[in-house]
Amino acid sequence: MAAACSATGAAGLLFLGTVGSSLPILETIEPGRFLDGVAFFLLPPAADATYRWLSGRKDRLAVAVGVLLVVAYPSLRNWALVVGPEGRGAFIVWDEDTGNESLPTEVTLLVQLLRTVTTPQARIMIEDADHLGKNQHAYGYTHLPALFPHVVGREFIGGPMECSRLAHHFVDFTSGRAFGREIDDFDDDELKVYLDLYNVGWIVAWSDVSRRNLDRRPFVRRLKTVGKYVLFEVDGVRSFGLDQPEIRVRAEPDKITVEGAVHERTVLKYHCMPGLRTEPPLPLACAEALDDPIGFIAVDNGKIADFTVLFDP
């Protein structure tokens, strides 16, 4: 009975974690978070199966469950089997590399550099690691790219957890891949158009392939190196409005303030989503651009130059 419950829980969470982004009720969250729960449900049967195997009862269940655990949760670095008073096994799981350590010095210096060199007029595209590949962490043993907007005070593109099946991950920059393709596959004109569309003014790269690629781009120049991280600056007009370099846009939680719009239809370089409205009330829709799968906020503002976009679900 216990094994059946564990298997049911693991199967349910595995389903949510892998295809949850296609379900309307889960499309705005991070379904990959459910995958940790899969490992939790797998631990009891895996412990029992391992005990059977170590006791000489080398049945197929032990092998099957052991393989399932490794496949579902490959990032487990260390584990120990503890035999309890009932003669059954239990797992103690830990990762000796994560511990309670501070951030690497070069990461702290990178944060300080980004605060100093960049401005709020454009985004920073930051290269994260491939969490299903050999480079699972690029900024210490953390998912720091998720916190960079807070600690640096800038808008970012890229990371974390690119492996989850969210359409928004199209704009990720991960281990030499950007906008759904290997960065080496872009010619200069293609890459420049994408960077302009998302108002990217700076790029942080750590992988060899990305650093070599960006070093040869005529519209990108290397600013500074901090350890393995290289900060590049992208030439071009800084603007969060599509084809409106004069526009002034300021984003904050649940609110985008627009001033000085010069077109009667204003397309902002922000993804659209359900629950958006404007003040004053104006027609709002999603505008397609390139092969972005989400679409951008488009407001039919007419002669109104100043307005606010609010997230009010």
Image (cartoon, helix red, strand yellow):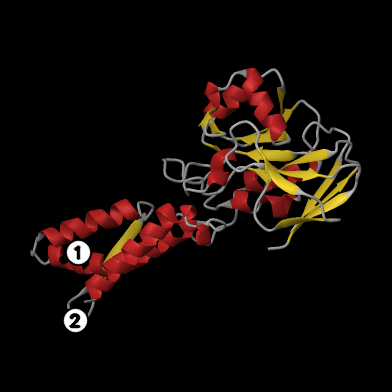
Disc 2 on helix, strand or loop? loop
Could you tell me residue 195's position as x and y percent? 68, 31
* Among numbered discs 1 and 2, the one appearing first in the sequence: 1
How many residues crowd around disc 2 within 10 Å: few (fewer than 14), some, or many (20 or more)?
Answer: few
Up-down: is 169 above or below 312? above
Residue on which the image places disc 1: 50
Q: Residue flagged by tag 2: what amino acid is it?
A: Glu
Query: Is residue 95 shown to the viewer in this render?
Result: no
Residue at 36% across, 67% down: 40
Residue on which the image places disc 2: 86
In the rendered structure, the answer to whether residue 218 lies left or right of residue 248 reads left
- Which of the 4 image quarters holds residue 234? top right
Residue at 35% across, 64% down: 12
Q: Residue flagged by tag 1: what amino acid is it?
A: Thr
Residue farthest bottom in this picture? 85
Marks 1/2 in contact by CB < 8 Å: the verdict is no
